[in-house]
Amino acid sequence: MAVKVLINGYGSIGKRVADAVAKQDDMEVIGVTKTKPDFEAKLAVEKGYKLFAAIPERKGLFEEKGVEIEGTIFDVIEDADIVVDCAPGGIGKDNLENIYKKYKVKAILQGGEKAKFVEDSFNALWSYDRCYGKDYIRVVSCNTTGLCRTFYAVDSVTDIVKARVVLIRRGADPNDAKRGPINAIVPNPPTVPSHHGPDVVSVVPKFEGKILTSAVIVPTTLMHMHSLMIETTGTTRDAILDAIEKTPRVFTVSAEDGLNSTATIIEYARDLGRPRYDLWEIPIWEESVNVVDNEVFLMQAVHQESDVIPENIDCIRAMLQMEDDNMKSIEKTNKSLGIK
Amino acid sequence: MAVKVLINGYGSIGKRVADAVAKQDDMEVIGVTKTKPDFEAKLAVEKGYKLFAAIPERKGLFEEKGVEIEGTIFDVIEDADIVVDCAPGGIGKDNLENIYKKYKVKAILQGGEKAKFVEDSFNALWSYDRCYGKDYIRVVSCNTTGLCRTFYAVDSVTDIVKARVVLIRRGADPNDAKRGPINAIVPNPPTVPSHHGPDVVSVVPKFEGKILTSAVIVPTTLMHMHSLMIETTGTTRDAILDAIEKTPRVFTVSAEDGLNSTATIIEYARDLGRPRYDLWEIPIWEESVNVVDNEVFLMQAVHQESDVIPENIDCIRAMLQMEDDNMKSIEKTNKSLGIK
Amino acid sequence: MAVKVLINGYGSIGKRVADAVAKQDDMEVIGVTKTKPDFEAKLAVEKGYKLFAAIPERKGLFEEKGVEIEGTIFDVIEDADIVVDCAPGGIGKDNLENIYKKYKVKAILQGGEKAKFVEDSFNALWSYDRCYGKDYIRVVSCNTTGLCRTFYAVDSVTDIVKARVVLIRRGADPNDAKRGPINAIVPNPPTVPSHHGPDVVSVVPKFEGKILTSAVIVPTTLMHMHSLMIETTGTTRDAILDAIEKTPRVFTVSAEDGLNSTATIIEYARDLGRPRYDLWEIPIWEESVNVVDNEVFLMQAVHQESDVIPENIDCIRAMLQMEDDNMKSIEKTNKSLGIK
Amino acid sequence: MAVKVLINGYGSIGKRVADAVAKQDDMEVIGVTKTKPDFEAKLAVEKGYKLFAAIPERKGLFEEKGVEIEGTIFDVIEDADIVVDCAPGGIGKDNLENIYKKYKVKAILQGGEKAKFVEDSFNALWSYDRCYGKDYIRVVSCNTTGLCRTFYAVDSVTDIVKARVVLIRRGADPNDAKRGPINAIVPNPPTVPSHHGPDVVSVVPKFEGKILTSAVIVPTTLMHMHSLMIETTGTTRDAILDAIEKTPRVFTVSAEDGLNSTATIIEYARDLGRPRYDLWEIPIWEESVNVVDNEVFLMQAVHQESDVIPENIDCIRAMLQMEDDNMKSIEKTNKSLGIK
Ligand SMILES: NC(=O)c1ccc[n+]([C@@H]2O[C@H](COP(=O)([O-])OP(=O)(O)OC[C@H]3O[C@@H](n4cnc5c(N)ncnc54)[C@H](O)[C@@H]3O)[C@@H](O)[C@H]2O)c1
Ligand SMILES: NC(=O)c1ccc[n+]([C@@H]2O[C@H](COP(=O)([O-])OP(=O)(O)OC[C@H]3O[C@@H](n4cnc5c(N)ncnc54)[C@H](O)[C@@H]3O)[C@@H](O)[C@H]2O)c1
Ligand SMILES: NC(=O)c1ccc[n+]([C@@H]2O[C@H](COP(=O)([O-])OP(=O)(O)OC[C@H]3O[C@@H](n4cnc5c(N)ncnc54)[C@H](O)[C@@H]3O)[C@@H](O)[C@H]2O)c1
Ligand SMILES: NC(=O)c1ccc[n+]([C@@H]2O[C@H](COP(=O)([O-])OP(=O)(O)OC[C@H]3O[C@@H](n4cnc5c(N)ncnc54)[C@H](O)[C@@H]3O)[C@@H](O)[C@H]2O)c1
């Protein structure tokens, strides 16, 4: 019997989690919530999802606009085995305290929330076992997810001594016409090292003190990019390429094939027929992979809107003890989505 | 029996035409051509299209890269009932003279070619009958296609006295990381009126002297936008909204629903599950539709990569005399693609 | 003796007004106000302006940061002959009610405020006389200022029957890395006609009902652009070019000279040695100027940060009755700034 | 007596070098060359520079357009003590072989040329003495110049063991409306390490093998940005801040002061009254300066259009043996430009 999943916050992440849950044979979407009766709400209903008001006072708004809702979150939460919270960063934590704990329902928060508010931080490769059976877990951010996967590949063939990463972040998601920058580079944060290193450590404690990151924001909407420089105890380019090949949800792309920018990588995802052009896997430029003095160099891109989606599915399986082998869950999720 | 279609130039337009042809029960893709063995070429083969070198001398390039090709265009052209030329603007005309006429095969050129090189200019609503049975026809550009459709809607309920249009054009397609501008507005052409008015007239001769256009290029990749001001002999806002409703391949969107920019319109197409987020129809902002002193005002967006695709399908049907009623062809094409 | 001018709000507009006032032999900057002790505040002090806290409670912030201030706005306002309010849009109106009226000091508001809160709306060519000796006046927005000037040129040689304008607006000022859009076109407002026509009418009442505008926002920071289509009772291209030549603060540029985008126009202002590359005049593309059936077509750009600056200077002269001939004030201001 | 300097190629770099030379009491601009009679050519003449055709066959173009020229480069080259070549990347090398060597005139090439074509690579802090009296020297690129300066500061207080740098490069100069990307991040080159490390080594041979760089291009025109991670034999944050303070042409900026992006840094240069908002110095974010385990972290921006300009002036002095102490030349140049 399928476990019952409620999606609280049907935005960029929420709508993708809903669609991914709907594709699993062991899960079922019992409802999605919205705060506004906009086009996303209408499409949710058209798709057949049961729609609920995330904020009871806003229920009237939906009725005024003729968008059919089934009630508020409080009319459905008790039926849920788990809630996937996809509210904007910072609100998930409030929902955890005010709703999920009160209703004693398991909940997943997203990467916009701090590690300290939950029991543990999830990545399917690294912390599946630790999150097994837990109640309140955070699926880490798109950037942290991308880094965790690549570090896993490297860690599988050598030991990481110290990693330095520069993150070049997209300014806004593609559907957001309000946020900038239009024509600037923004050191964000301006302090170095940035919080991205410690966020990786929340998933992989053994990397404590070993991941040093800095980050800037640039005027693009498509993807983040990372430049990684990873000192190891010793490895080769071939070993790294082989490890990437064997690690789930990372793959190499070649600039020579025309995949020479985040623009053509997105074109590739469009051509693959991916829903919403989602690229759940992390593309790593083959040309960039290099080992100099035991230090691994590589550049990768991160499709911020989608790389965390399969992680949410696996996290549900771990928390609800549906599958005790992380690799089996990963494989099941990948197959359902069409990830090779 | 399905007619045999060859796509010469498997780029932004070509790959979409191929996929659309493949969806028709009365058509068949007998081959697609590429000049380079890049990721698009590889995906074409993976999709099952027979790939040919568009330029014989480049055949070796494909072999070197291990991309399987079936030969060159000259190995397949004689099997084709029609070629859809999707080479870059200006090259279609050369192909017409050097290849299609020589091989006596019917051919469709795209909007990057000039009207004078072909027998007529195609839009499914306006010039289907004129192109019926013809040999060399041009499907007009994305901008002209968008304007023709909206003018058709307006023309269906009143007479157009004079139309003024300002076109705000995307700088480059989303997969193109080379072209700008990054941070500028470019009057293009700097002369007014621009050539876009006469291009509409190539489809609708009765509009001669009545369409006055100017155009700028701006730093965006998603869609073009048009601001239309159409003097008529008399109409009302309701009549125009009703005409839009009844005209194929145009529809209204509402800023109030959150569809308040080209960014959210593309998000809408992604959420609809459209392949490559293609929006074959022209969205017109409901809020912008207004009639003041018999002049219709409205703003619309144009998804440059895809609005001409259904037109290419209908154009094949007209040229090969497969269906003599344009509205039936339009309906058949729309149904195959999932356009309501 | 020089009149005493206080600048309330030393931001994009305020710092330029201060520098322009400082260049006049009949005016003196007695102070500028800031709400935060940032780099602009520090540079104001370095330049020799007396700095005051715009908001008394924030005084401490400046002291903490070691930025020397002379007190708060209330320590200087009684010395002022006039205040030029350059606070963010909407706040000027509050300052008018809560401060300027109470202290009985004349005040200029900027274009972010509504016409109805002041006695009249100012443009040096059109409404200097009407504002002469008045107490509370609004210098209209950058877009409205640009339109008023061009309409003045056209109006000087023919009669305007109806004008249609599409405004393509910059998304954010160049110093603003927060606002977008990054990659979208935003109809803003989505309703047509937009408020820009009525704003011109607040300056030129005889244009009531004759100016129909629509507007979009695009991802650029440098300049706005306008496409104008002006029906007249009759004129010629030469007459219009001549009128532009004779009208102050508008001039023609030629795409053929390389001035083919807002990017190269700004480069031109940089090369001219303009402070902050300010282009106080409205550049009109010579190639775009055309007359078809008595309708004038042209495209112009607007340097949003600076075109209103000379207007503020002339407005001070009008309100304080320092010069009763608008053309003499314009000439004096232009000479002081280096406008030919 | 002033040395005679000819500027070959009056573009982004050339026009700035000309203006900087004109400000030196020991140098004189005897001519500037252009290939097209555009607005830059006209302004050169208006400024009083003698204009020559860079390419003799193009002389007619200038005459047609009524732009006064004094002849071709061959009419002036023999009068020059030195030519500063500012032609587009790659052309300088041809000019060196075909013109400068033939006419036996000393010449400076710019950073778009390869190191191997000249005798040495110039940075005023590092290689002034080596270039003293030489004939053919290259002033290194904007990025390399920025890195050389910061490494000099660090090297002045500790020893550099290994430096890793990620360069986030502007896509096009602000006057360029043709080049993109509009909405993408481009790994450029996609191989790691990039050529930027070896380019630093061409100036500072002792860094051989110690500088490892990677680079991406992003959609911005204002400045490049660098994230530096420099392993040293030991130092402190205070020592580094002190070294920055003492090193010419680098300085710290504070995000807390509002200088929190390249956009506000450029605003700062505009507010300083810099010609064309040129920021000849390298701004380093104070907040970003940090030392962890003897590794220096910092983020800096580079104003690509101007940081090499003072270097060109010092390079002239070295090559013509006008001053044998590099620090004296630096000081003299800085004073002439207004660099503190
Ligand atoms: N977009 C990304 O790139 C991305 C990537 C990884 C993780 N995340 C994280 O995912 C979370 C969601 O981000 P998003 O980009 O989907 O945001 P979003 O703004 O696209 O969607 C948030 C949704 O939550 C709804 N909402 C608002 N208040 C709510 C409330 N009180 N209760 C329930 N729902 C509410 C909104 O209506 C909206 O539909 C954040 O923590 C974010 O940091 C985002
Ligand atoms: N992209 C748009 O927005 C758009 C919209 C409407 C119409 N069009 C028109 O469609 C046509 C194709 O444009 P596109 O955007 O698809 O271009 P594109 O550059 O994306 O694709 C062109 C394809 O043609 C191939 N090609 C190059 N030389 C060729 C040759 N000699 N023979 C055959 N193929 C060759 C290229 O390899 C490439 O695959 C042009 O006329 C263009 O003006 C483009
Ligand atoms: N920037 C433009 O393109 C432009 C063009 C024409 C007109 N305007 C108008 O000029 C006005 C100012 O715009 P701006 O772009 O200079 O804004 P800005 O944000 O650059 O500057 C506003 C300044 O006002 C200060 N301020 C904030 N609250 C204040 C208060 N209560 N009292 C006094 N000062 C306060 C801020 O600290 C800031 O220094 C607005 O009405 C705007 O609509 C702006
Ligand atoms: N723009 C930058 O960011 C930057 C920074 C540092 C170094 N550089 C280097 O400076 C050099 C010049 O770059 P730029 O940005 O000023 O280029 P640019 O294109 O702005 O200017 C080049 C000028 O050279 C002229 N020119 C063209 N062909 C010529 C020829 N055969 N002989 C003489 N002049 C010719 C052009 O007309 C133009 O005026 C290049 O080597 C470049 O790599 C550029």
Image (spheres, coloured by chain):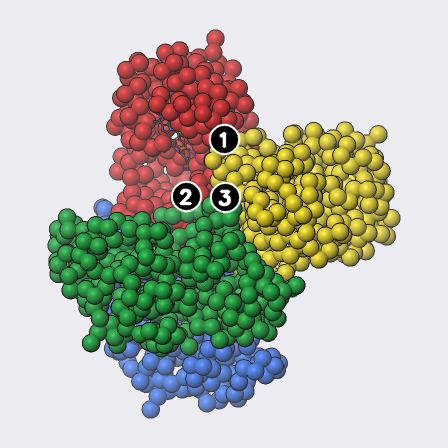
Chain colours: A red, B yellow, C green, D blue
| Residue at image coords 17%, 60% | C77
**Quadrant housing residue A173:** top left
Residue D256 place in picture, x, y as percent: 23, 51
Residue C8 place in picture, x, y as percent: 24, 58
Residue type (three-letter) at the residue carrying disc 1: Phe
Dot 3 surroundings within 10 Å: few (below 14), some, or many (20 or more)? many
Dot 2 surroundings within 10 Å: few (below 14), some, or many (20 or more)? some
Which circle marks residue A39 in the picture? Answer: 1
Q: C331 or A287: which is nearer to us? A: C331
Residue type (three-letter) at the residue carrying disc 2: Lys
Is B205 drawn above or below residue C46 in the view shown?
A: above
Residue at image mark 2? A178
Letter of the chain that mark 2 sits on in the rendering: A
Residue B272 place in picture, x, y as percent: 56, 30
Residue at image mark 3? C191
Q: Do the residues at discs 2 and 1 belong to one chain?
A: yes
Is B1 drawn above or below residue B179 in the view shown?
A: above
Secondary structure of the residue carrying numbered label 3: loop
Q: Where, quadrant-wise, is the C terminus of chain B in this rendering? A: top right
Is B115 on the left-hand or right-hand side of A168?
Answer: right
Give the foreground label among 3 and 1.
3
| Residue at image coords 35%, 40% | A232
**Quadrant housing residue B269:** top right
| Residue at image coords 45%, 22% | A63
